[in-house]
């Protein structure tokens, strides 16, 4: 609870939710907050960098540290840490101690209480059993604010996927082609087998087997054999795999890595046979993916339709196209990826339906993917203080009453 209250005090300082004209340090000096500083989201160093604070008409530029109790400064051993020597103001809710830096300087202390309205609203967000906890204000949010936040969330989501793909490229010795195949394989795992599919993809020597791709039976045997799943299929594959294994000096993965708690059509050996078919039909090349202009091209290239093409485009086509465009400074590819995402219908799942029940309009996959990012990175982690919807909820009646 103390940690949450400290976060809320950070929020109070960051957004200047305090009476600006009556600020004084604990020893009676006047305080004017010119700039609260740059918020430090890490756990290392002062909470706000490069703040500008006037104390008795002298302008100070430096860092600000925030604690619920002033004595926390000593509990956290800041008095022995030279990284805190540039702190110019200690902001607290309870001034139970005078603090000093490692070089012996006494830091001015400013007491800022967390407003009761703000604390009550925050407690409601943290303790609500409903999802989303801010449901009361969603229907009345201006469209522009909603759109701006969903756009920011989508950028976050795609940048995270871009980092994942770039890491995959590194593991594939810089090969975007092999990284794309691994991404394609991973998304064939439908979550439960995603990690296993990516591990499997790393065992496939793409350049070595390329001249076998016109023989579907050989590709199926190799894919299944490398997955350690020959026991799940016709034994005609075992003899063929034995030949290919010796030829390419292959080591299969442990077949126990696969999970079968899925629908029969999503069992790993079924999905591997589908992937073998795509590879055989030359539908797993990165160049062809990057040439797709719209969902019709995607559907035609991969022979997917309906919900299947939607999921494939969301999870494979758009992230790969965006990551490749970002890495190679091809903004047209990034823009095309976003255009394709906006052209898809919104996903129909529990998360999307709950937001719709609150009055939020969710029209496209761009919107629904943004809401998945919101759920995973903000709602589930109770990061309401970093959420723009949370900001509107926290302000609530408080913003209309506090400054009267």
Image: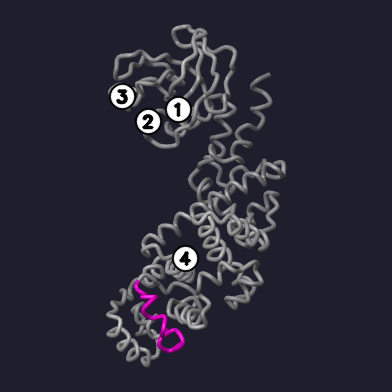
Give the CA distance from mark 1 to mark 4: 40 Å
Closer to the chain start, of discs 1 and 4, is 1
* Residue 348 lies in the magenta stretch: no
Badge 3 crowding class, 10 Å Cα cut-off, few under 14, some 14 to 19, many 20 or more, is few
> Which residue lies at the image location 48% right of the left edge and 6% below the top edge?
28
- The residue beneath circle 1 is 49
Q: Are marks 1 and 2 in contact (CB under 8 Å)?
A: yes
Give the CA distance from mark 1 to mark 3: 15 Å
Q: Are marks 4 and 2 in contact (CB under 8 Å)?
A: no
Q: Is residue 192 visible?
A: no
- The residue beneath circle 3 is 82
Q: Is residue 88 above or below residue 237?
A: above
Give the CA distance from mark 4 to mark 2: 37 Å
> Which residue lies at the image location 57% right of the left edge and 62% below the top edge?
318
Q: Nearer the viewer, residue 67 or 216?
A: 216
- The residue beneath circle 2 is 45
Q: Is residue 288 above or below residue 68?
A: below
Q: Is residue 181 visible?
A: yes
- Give coordinates of residue 104: x percent, y percent: 30, 14
- Give coordinates of residue 293: x percent, y percent: 64, 66
Magenta residues (range):
203-219
Give the CA distance from mark 1 to mark 2: 9 Å
Badge 1 crowding class, 10 Å Cα cut-off, few under 14, some 14 to 19, many 20 or more, is some
> Which residue lies at the image location 51% right of the left edge and 11% below the top edge?
24
Q: Is residue 313 above or below residue 52?
A: below
Q: Nearer the viewer, residue 19 or 89?
A: 89
Q: Are marks 3 and 4 in contact (CB under 8 Å)?
A: no
Q: Nearer the viewer, residue 200 or 93?
A: 200
């Amino acid at each position: 609870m103390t940690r949450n209250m400290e976060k809320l005090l950070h929020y109070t300082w960051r957004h200047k939710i305090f009476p600006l004209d009556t600020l004084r340090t604990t020893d009676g000096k006047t305080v004017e907050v010119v700039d609260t500083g740059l918020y430090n989201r890490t756990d290392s160093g002062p909470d706000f960098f490069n703040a500008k604070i006037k104390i008795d008409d002298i302008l100070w530029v430096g860092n600000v540290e925030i604690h619920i109790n002033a004595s926390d400064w000593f509990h956290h051993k800041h008095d022995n840490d030279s990284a805190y020597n540039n702190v110019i103001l200690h902001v607290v809710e309870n001034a139970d101690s005078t603090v000093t830096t490692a070089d012996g300087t006494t830091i001015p202390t400013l007491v800022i209480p967390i407003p009761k309205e703000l604390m009550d609203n925050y407690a409601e967000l943290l303790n609500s059993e409903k999802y989303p906890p801010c449901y009361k204000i969603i229907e009345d949010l201006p469209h522009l604010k909603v759109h701006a936040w969903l756009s920011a969330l989508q950028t976050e989501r795609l940048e995270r996927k871009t980092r994942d793909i770039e890491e995959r490229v590194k593991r594939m010795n810089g090969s975007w082609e092999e990284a794309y195949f691994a991404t394609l394989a991973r998304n064939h795992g439908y979550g439960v087998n995603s990690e296993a599919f990516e591990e499997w993809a790393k065992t496939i020597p793409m350049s070595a087997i390329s001249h076998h791709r016109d023989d579907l039976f050989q590709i199926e045997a190799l894919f299944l054999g490398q997955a350690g799943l020959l026991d799940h299929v016709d034994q005609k594959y075992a003899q063929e795999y034995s030949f290919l294994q010796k030829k390419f000096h292959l080591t299969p993965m442990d077949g126990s890595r696969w999970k079968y708690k899925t629908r029969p059509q999503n069992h790993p050996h079924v999905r591997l046979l589908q992937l073998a078919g795509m590879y055989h039909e030359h539908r797993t090349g990165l160049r062809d993916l990057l040439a797709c202009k719209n969902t019709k091209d995607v559907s035609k290239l991969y022979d997917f339709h309906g919900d299947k093409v939607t999921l494939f485009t969301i999870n494979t086509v758009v992230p790969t196209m965006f990551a490749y465009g970002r890495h190679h400074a091809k903004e047209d590819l990034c823009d095309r990826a976003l255009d394709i995402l906006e052209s898809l219908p919104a996903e129909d799942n529990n998360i999307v339906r709950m937001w719709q029940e609150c009055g939020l309009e969710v029209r496209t996959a761009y919107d629904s993917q943004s809401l998945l990012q919101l759920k995973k990175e903000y709602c589930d982690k109770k990061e309401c203080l970093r959420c723009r919807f949370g900001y509107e909820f926290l302000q609530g009646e408080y913003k209309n009453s506090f400054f009267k």
